[in-house]
Amino acid sequence: MLTVTVGQLNRYVKAVLEEDGKLSDLYVRGEISNFTNHYRSGHFYFTLKDGTGSIKAVMFKGDAQYVRVIPENGMAVLARGRVGVYERDGVYQLYVNDIQPEGAGALAGAFEQRKARLAAQGLFDPARKKPLPPYPTRVGIVTSQTGAALEDMLSVLERRYPCCAAVVAPAQVQGGAAPATLIAALELLDKTAGCDLIIVGRGGGSSEDLWCFNDEALAHAIYTCNTPIISAVGHETDYTICDFVADLRAPTPSAAAELAVPSRAELRDRLSKQRDRLRQQAEALIGDRSVWLRRIQSRPVLQNPAAGVEKMQERLDFFVKALYNRKRIFIQTKTTDIGSRAVLLDSLSPLRILERGYCLTYKGKTPVRAVRALSPGDSVSVRFWDGAATAVVETIREEKHR
Amino acid sequence: MKKNMTFEQAALRLDEIVAMLERADLPLDESLKLFSEGAELLAFCDTKLAGAKLKIETLFPENNAAEVEDGSN
């Protein structure tokens, strides 16, 4: 009877199993359950089962990152690996180095199932699709740094809209590690790079190669992204979950770049058309006014402005002459007037009357107008044209006629 | 013209100005104002579209790789 420690036992069992050539490399057929993809470590942990039993399985990052189709629960697979013992827990398990979906329908079935589930969660809701900015200044690109897709996209951006910046966040675009790197790159661009939109994609490949773009965590990352996303995975005929969640699906990476930016040549065409239209309007505006100006300029008054002045001068001269005339006539008239008045005045002067032989009698200083103003004995003064004489009234004889 | 205008805003305003000048019978000084704004916008759009070469930046996400552990689930 043998007595050993736990450690010794496990080590022994492990050695026995590993000596067996059959167990060192074999294919195991089964269905996946309890699948865990450790995004941080990159390892896959799962259980393979069939109708009769199950076995734990692990696939380390070194192999998992090259897996074409990420396994998922319920998927029928063919796993290749070796049988080994995990001494700490005393369990034997399958160390898988390659895994493939088994049967033609396995992949399509898994895809449809997942698509239906995510659709039910509202991830493909058209109302949630964000509009793309018409004139992006920073275009984010999540793809393989070494793929032709990146070159294609950059050359389209360069040709079409070199006035923008391309911000590339490299990621793995196939294999088990791809979803984690795609998500990390996407989040980096979304949160810190100030991109107006992000293109996520890769060039063509088999549906197994593109399988990582069907990843559920990636779908959720795209869904929660704040930046509009164009999905461009594979060729025109390839559809991935990523295409359904993205705000826009492009048939190829080059097409995504075309959709992402406007054509600078077209914009410049448009600008130059607008420049022409502005110029036309300006010319029309100036044209209208220059017609008006020409019409005004053709008026005689502006043709020979001096003519107008001359005419005015003539009129002014005429008025001035007329005025002088008036003045002269007026003065003449007045002069004549005064002359005739002087004659009249003269003719009315009492001295004139005295000249004709009449005389005036004064009593004191008062002219005597009637005989009854006098009494005999009154002293009077008699005024002649050439002098005066004094006299005494002798008699009064009043005549009663009149 | 406003400061910090985007290309989009400038393009929209330019459309508006051309349409106004073509449609409306505006007073001369109004038209002249629009012309000078239009010319400014054209110049602004030209500068936004300038640049002979695409700028390319590369940002590397934090490495996701973690230690490989000989563990099971």
Image: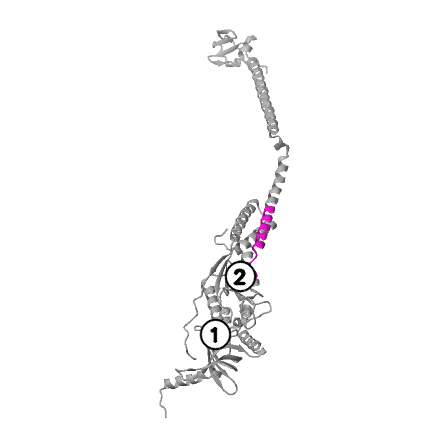
| Amino acid type for the residue under numbered disc 2 | Glu
Secondary structure, mark 1, is helix
Q: Which chain carries label 2?
A: A
Q: Is residue A278 magenta?
A: yes
Q: Which mark is drawn over residue A354? A: none
Toward the viewer: B26 or A314?
A: B26
Q: Predominant secondary structure in magenta? A: helix
Percent of width and height locating residue A142: 50, 65
Residue placed at 62% from the left, 32% from the top? A303
Q: Mark 1 points at which residue?
A: A63
Dot 1 or dot 2: first in sequence order is: 1
Mark in the foreground, 1 or 2: 1
Q: In this view, does A243 lie above or below A389?
A: below
The reply to the same-chain question for discs 1 and 2 is: yes
Q: Whole-Å distance between the Cαs marked 1 and 2?
A: 28 Å
Residue placed at 61% from the left, 41% from the top? A289
Relative side of A260 to A291, left or right: left
Percent of width and height locating residue A329: 59, 20
Percent of width and height locating residue A270: 59, 53
The span shown in magenta is A257-281
Q: Name the residue under label 2.
A: A151
Secondary structure, mark 2, is helix
